[in-house]
Amino acid sequence: MNAWMVARWSDDEFAVLLPGLVFPEEAVYMARSIVATVAAPCTGSAAHLRLSAAIGIAVAPSDGDNPATLMRHAAVAEHAGRMSVEHLVRFELSLSQEAEGRLLIEQQLPLALERGEFSVAFQPEVDAASHRIVGLEALARWHHPVLGEVPPVRFIPIAEEIGVIAEIGQFVLRSAVRHAAQWRSDGLGDVRVAVNVSAHQLTDRSLVAVVLECLDETGLPAHLLELEVTESAAMVDAQAAAEVLGELARQGVTISLDDFGTGYSNIGKLHNLAVSTIKIDRSFLLEDEANPAADPGALLHAVVTLGRNLGLRVIAEGVETEEQLNRLQTQGLDAYQGFLFSRPVPAAEILRLLREDRPLGSGSGIQIA
Ligand code: C2E
Ligand code: MG
Ligand code: MG
């Protein structure tokens, strides 16, 4: 009989070797039973301990024909296993490609700022009645010489994990505030700029000093800066977020709740966060494919009414089509943002749009493609 072997690999990592398996599924059954055993509550001591384990499975020879490859692939699967519901994942090639891509981003991100690879794009928010620009959302853009354009959904979560989000956030903040102050001093009007703030920045009190310093340096009035936070970011440490945002709001900075309706926030906590605007997530504008009979406007209406009753400004994000706009027009929103009006564009293009000062959207000649 082939003996199983358990070895401690590093501090909290163990390798389990299962030689002589007939079916790879046997490894999955074994892994399930290990996960369940570890997850059982430890009683008997004064403290009630709850442990968890994640497992990655690599099977020879299909997932590797030598120990080093098998261990590497098991580690890649284990990383994916931490995020999975079952806490276990069997290796597959796409995981490895994903892990390699991620590793490359992890290595390149800290250098990207020094190399000047970041820039900021601005996407207009338009007034619901006039379709003229009332605000601009600043969005980070990363152009890597080899990887090309890396989208924020790819690099922002990694930047948060490896601790460089504050630097990227500061770069975007400085750039946005500087541009807004410049457009204002050029006589192009009082357009508010909105900057996204991540969970990590929200729990760091130095954000207050950095924001005030930016405003001071450029002379931009505080009410022309908006900070966008997501419900989930604000709830990571609700107490710290409330303090930081409260202080900024007292200084006149506007706070908005981004991707509203996608998190699980306690509505009662919105006021603690000094929020004055909600940005309704684009998913509220999409048909429910799983439930085509559902009225797509009903949920949207409920969310808009909620915002209104709380005395908040309400913006719809991700407006892409005339049909969506028609549905929105009966809801009494304050502003819209989406590809129908303009994609995120470089500052030079915003300068042109502000100079033209005309309604955006259908018939306006703005490129929608
Ligand atoms: P967000 O803050 O909700 O920004 C809006 C995103 O929706 C942008 O994607 C924008 O290009 C996209 N969008 C706007 N209109 C439409 C539309 O009509 N249809 C569709 N399908 N999409 C639309 P982007 O620039 O790729 O950014 C994605 C997310 O990355 C942002 O979502 C934000 O959460 C994060 N992000 C971007 N820049 C920063 C930053 O400087 N700091 C932080 N912390 N996060 C950032
Ligand atoms: Mg945003
Ligand atoms: Mg959003």
Image (cartoon, rainbow, N blue to C red):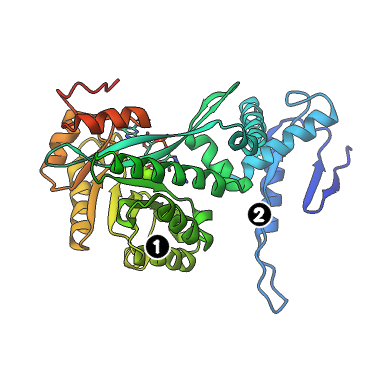
Element class at badge 1: helix
* Sequence order check, earlier mark of 1 and 2: 2
Q: Is residue 268 above or below residue 145?
A: below
Q: Residues within 10 Å of mark 2 (few under 14, many from 20)?
A: some
Residue 137, by quadrant, is top left
What numbered label is drawn on residue 66? none
Image point (23%, 31%), residue name: 355
Image point (48%, 31%), residue name: 151
Where is residue 331? Give x, y as percent.
13, 46
Image point (23%, 43%), residue name: 189
Residue 4, by quadrant, is top right
Q: Is residue 355 above or below residue 30?
A: above
Number of the front mark, 1 or 2: 1
Where is residue 185? Give x, y as percent.
30, 43
Residue under numbered circle 1: 248
> Do the CB atoms of the residues marked 1 and 2 lie less than 8 Å apart?
no
What numbered label is drawn on residue 36? 2
Kind of residue at badge 2: Ala
Where is residue 74? Give x, y as percent.
73, 36
Q: Work out how far the residue at label 1 is from the one at label 2, CA to CA, in angstroms.
A: 46 Å
Quarter of the image with the C terminus in it: top left
